[in-house]
Image (cartoon, grey):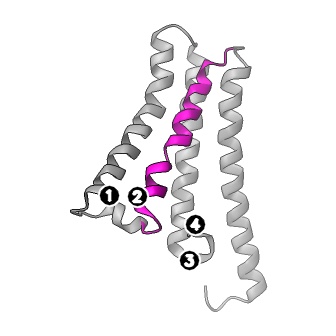
Amino acid sequence: MADMPGYFRTCFHTGRLACLALLVAGGIVLQILACALYNNWWPMLTVIMYVILPMPLMFFAGSDTSSLYSESGSCWLEATKFLTGASTVGSIAIPIILKHAGVIGWGAMALELSSFFVFVLSILTYLGMSSEDDGYSMF
């Protein structure tokens, strides 16, 4: 990528950033559609988990995301992994529990779960973009 002209590299980075923005916007639209189409706003409970999900990573892991993929003896890093995993499971479990309780229908549950997977895809895309270069890192 170093042999490309600067204007082409900038255009390429802007396109990747626009794709990331479209993924996040698509996840938000699916989240709202799950509630608005069925006139039932209980599926918005998963938004709480989406807000809680990055908190342990921001507070305990900092900017070193490579340590999340390795074995370490740090109890703070282990707590970060546990809390992030619990929030992820909660994001999947809330729509399933609401469907099991008869509060939402199959369509709302499907839209909620598809919203979750779009958000996961956007997070993985962001991590891939930030590992390739330092142009999009948070810290």
- Disc 4 is placed on an element classified as loop
The answer to the question of whether label 3 and label 1 lie on touching residues, with beta carbons closer than 8 A, is: no
Residue receiving disc 3: 133
The correct choice, above or below, for 40 with respect to 123 in the image is above
Nearer the N terminus, badge 4 or badge 3?
3
Q: Nearer the viewer, residue 60 or 33?
A: 60
Q: Inspect the image, locate mark 4, and give the three-letter code of the amino acid beneath it.
A: Met
Give the alpha-carbon distance from disc 3 to disc 1, as whole Å. Answer: 24 Å
Q: Position of residue 35 (x, y in %)?
A: 68, 22
Q: In the figure, is residue 122 to the left or right of 84?
A: right
Label 2 crowd bin: few (<14), some (14–19), many (20+), radius 10 Å: some
Residue receiving disc 2: 60
Nearer the N terminus, badge 3 or badge 1?
1
Residue at image location 51% in from the left, 56% down from the top: 124
Label 4 crowd bin: few (<14), some (14–19), many (20+), radius 10 Å: few
Chief secondary structure of the magenta portion: helix
Identify the disc placed on residue 138.
4
Residue receiving disc 1: 77
Residue at image location 73% in from the left, 66% down from the top: 15
Nearer the N terminus, badge 2 or badge 4?
2
Give the alpha-carbon distance from disc 1 to disc 4, as whole Å. Answer: 18 Å
Q: Inspect the image, locate mark 2, and give the three-letter code of the amino acid beneath it.
A: Phe
Q: In the figure, is residue 110 to the left or right of 26?
A: left
Q: Inspect the image, locate mark 1, and give the three-letter code of the amino acid beneath it.
A: Leu
Nearer the N terminus, badge 1 or badge 4?
1
The answer to the question of whether label 1 and label 2 lie on touching residues, with beta carbons closer than 8 A, is: yes
The correct choice, above or below, for 64 with respect to 26 in the image is below
